[in-house]
Image (spheres, rainbow, N blue to C red):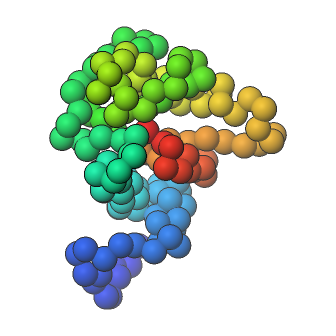
Amino acid sequence: MPKQKKKKAPNQEPTHSQVMRWAVEGVNGNIESQIKYTNYWKNAWNKYSYEPGSTMIHEKDYQPMNCCLCGKEMVSIHDTHNPAPLTPRTYAKEALEQNLPHRCCGECNATRVNPARTEGLPKGSVLIDMLEFPLTSVHVSQGKGFG
Ligand SMILES: [Zn+2]
């Protein structure tokens, strides 16, 4: 892939189309795009964690916990997911502040939670974790409720 000629200012937010381009390139195996896409969402997550009413927590506030579905230790906030509908809906902030056990790992999210969530959605719908490459399909964002 050719390098971009213009460098973006460090604090400039990428456009939606840029982010979607990284997603598509990442799905097609472009490692650089995968990293950019993942970092974009991690930054967005951390930024959103400071907003009033946020259901997310900053990655530095995360206290490692075990997956409530398989027991695996989740070392990063970005490895944890809301397991609903398999458990009560639990966002990262609720789990931290109320000491709730209901968070699951990326693997359980992909293999157990997402299939449960796609039941009842139009045929062909695919849910994909925005923070987990490599993947083979197109991502469907969970919006601000993600986390
Ligand atoms: Zn798990």
Q: Using residue 50 as the reference point, say whether residue 92 is left or right of it.
A: right
Q: Is residue 144 above or below residue 40?
A: above
Q: Residue at x 74, y 29 (%)?
A: 119
Q: Is residue 54 above or below residue 87?
A: below
Whether residue 69 appears in this view of the structure is yes
Q: State the image coordinates of residue 8 (x, y, percent, origin top left).
A: 29, 81
**Near-viewer residue (48 or 24):** 48
- Residue 7, picture quadrant: bottom left
- Residue 40, picture quadrant: bottom left
Q: Residue at x 61, y 41 (%)?
A: 127
Q: Quadrant of the N terminus?
A: bottom left
Q: State the image coordinates of residue 142 (x, y, percent, origin top left).
A: 55, 46
Q: Using residue 37 as the reference point, say whether residue 57 is left or right of it.
A: left
Q: Residue at x 57, y 18 (%)?
A: 86
Q: Is residue 31 above or below residue 21?
A: above
Q: Quadrant of the C terminus?
A: top left
Q: Residue at x 31, y 77 (%)?
A: 12
Whether residue 35 appears in this view of the structure is no
